[in-house]
Amino acid sequence: MFHRESGYFKTTYAADSGLYPLPIAKWTIGVLLAGFILLPTISTALSGAVSAEYYVSVVNLILIAVVGALGLNILVGYTGQISIGHAAFMSVGAYTAANLAVKLGLPFWVTLPAGGLMAAFIGAIVGIPSLRIKGLYLAIATLAAQLIIEWVINHTPAISGGSQASIEVPRPTVLGYPLKTQRELYYFLLFFAVLAIVGTLNLVRSRIGRAFIAIRDQDIAAEIIGIDIFRYKLTAFAISSFYAGVTGVLYTYYLGIANYENFLITTSIDYLAMIIIGGLGSVLGSILGAIFVTLLPILIRVFMESFGTLLFSASELNNVIPATRLGLFGLLIIVFLVVEPEGLNRLWRNIRNYFRVWPFSY
Amino acid sequence: MQCDRTGATQTVGVFFCPAVHDYTNLINSKGGVEGRKIRAMEIDHEYKVPQGMEAYERHKKEGAVSILLYGTPHTQALAAKLAEDKIPGTSPGFGSAASADGKRYPYLFPIAATYWSQAAAAVKFVKDKLGGNLKGKKIAYLFYDNPAGKEPLPILEDLAKLEGFELKTFAVPAPGVEMGAQVLDITQRYRADFVIAHLFGRSPSVSIKEFKRVGYPLSKVVSFVWGSAEADLEAAGGGAVAEGYNTMQFAGVGSDYPVHKQIRDMYQKEGKPAPKEMASTVYYNRGIFHIAVHIEAVRNALKAKGANANITGEDVKNGFEKVKGVTLDGLMPPLEITPTDHEGGGWVQIFTVKGGKLTKSSEWFRAYPEVIKKHIEADAKKS
């Protein structure tokens, strides 16, 4: 946020390595968190209960995307291993949780970690080729994993629950109370999204995180300074897949159904787009990217609905809106990347750095 | 209304969605439903589920009383939500066959023949074509390898036992543009007496071309509803190539129904030419069919509550369950939706390509309702 560091002196290592060393930063985070907790209440007060339900539903989609994008960024952004199979790991988590919830009747606080762990396990196996191959070759290997997992789910009734390959799961219950409305689900999702954010922030400044970054920057050098590449590459795959699995479970509980058609290759590409637009190798970038990719199509439509009638007749507009939505979406992504190749995160840092010394920027 | 004009199934959406608007405008220009105007709000979801969810919440925010769904994964994703919010949704020709069960899915209405009913009707059609007896005959089932493609399998297997025919399945993997091997297998090695095809997107046209190439008579192929449009025939090389190809329809084909004349007149009055989308009559008519059922449901709701009442999703749901006898002069099947049967009977019609055009070759019919009923009940018990 916009604040200056002058006048604060750190006297211990612990203070220096704190996530938010400045009191004002702690306050900002506190206010932000409070804002998010009160968000449904505020939006209800501003726009009425019916509209608030819609706004909260959009935020819910973003929260789910944030968890998934963070997971992918750990692998691609921090460890430098390309993966096009992210959505497949989500489906692994989704089906694991759905089967446990329906067949064994387990509650979400068991199925959610179980889905994540299962995805982590599969992810670690898929990560094995990364020990020998890099770059585009690895991308193709993970693409193969995506297709294999899709096929296996589609053709194994024991996993997919029959020819429709979809399993209806009951709503998550907290203390016997089922979470049904968008507002209730919002807190459910917010809890896990915050957990994922805090987890990642701490992960990347730990020993494991530094090992990931060393591998990304130069894997041979990393090996020479004593980082066990075998272990850390597979760990990166496992952690990333764990996040993906949890995303899949959250999505399953959010929809009330596990269906592998929600986790096709296009979803993998969407998540890659999120972290590239947001900024590789940054937590804030994952969040911004998830917000951007989810929100942009919605905003384009709202904008076109309001102003499109100036240019087109109503019946034409129905054809124009979806087309412009796709076109404008692609165009904006290109523009953003040309303006700032390092993503929204860098854009934000540039703005912040400008104001940090403003008005004496010399 | 959810719609897909840009995603994986855009070949359907670009004709389907304008038809919904045209029919809505027609009804409104004639004074609306019981004096009330209908507003059809379209949101394109690119055939992606998150966008579909967002579209649904947006519709809910705008106060929608009933929703035209689009896409099998979207229908399944919204099934629970619709019941919680008490807004009826319809899924003609897609969604899940088990949702015909009105008790289990009170707010989901397939309104047209599900894949199970289509499978039963296809077998009935084959039986008639092969002289009324299927004992020892070989039927090949060529399907797109996804959940929707596999859904009819249990019905076909049951009917194979019941009628004594031999069934062999041939899966076409996504994206379904390569099926030379499967077609050769069907025609040369298996030597099927008849082929039932259940394909989507580009793949129906590929199948027509392949069957033609190996010299298999297309009159021995019957396709499910999503391989049945003019666009598929054109992509295969025009009506002449597809001569004899049998297609299954849940709404009538052709633009000579009185409702088309009314829509053309409406456009003429505004000084505009008739919409070009009308030329693709299969999808256009399905669009009309889809919205017409909704309008009838709303009409029933308004009749029950009074023309000035503020109707809710629940009222429209009850309205759906009273839909009966809307035919639009043959464009629609003899639909009868009841609180238990949300499919409305499961009627289909077969159209055959004759002289390059889709020509009606059967009346509305349905088949083996007892087999389908058994499966719906078994499915309800499973959960």
Image: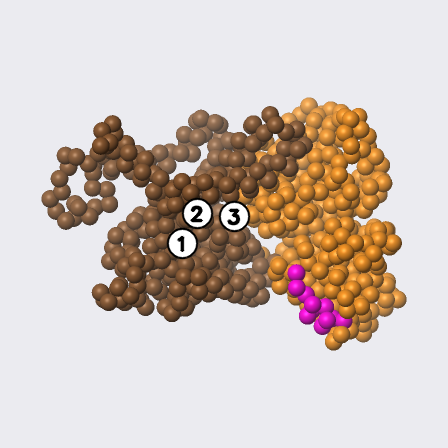
Give how far apart the Cα atoms at labels 2 and 3 are.
Answer: 22 Å
Give how far apart the Cα atoms at labels 1 and 2 are.
Answer: 9 Å
Q: Residues in magenta?
A: B177-187
Q: Which residue is mark 3?
A: A255
Q: Nearer the viewer, residue B366 or B105?
A: B366
**Circle 2 chain:** A
Question: Is residue A350 shown left or right of residue A176?
Answer: left
Q: Amino acid at mark 1?
A: Leu
Color scheme of the displayed model: by chain
Q: Which residue is mark 1?
A: A72
* Picture layout, residue B335 above or below residue B258: below
Q: Nearer the viewer, residue A139 or A44?
A: A139
Q: Which residue is mark 2?
A: A274
Chain letter, colour brown in render: A
Give how far apart the Cα atoms at labels 1 and 3 are.
Answer: 22 Å
* Picture layout, residue B324 above or below residue A144: above
- Colour of chain B, in one word, is orange
Residue A308 on image: x %, y %:
59, 29
> Is residue A286 a member of the stretch shown in magenta?
no
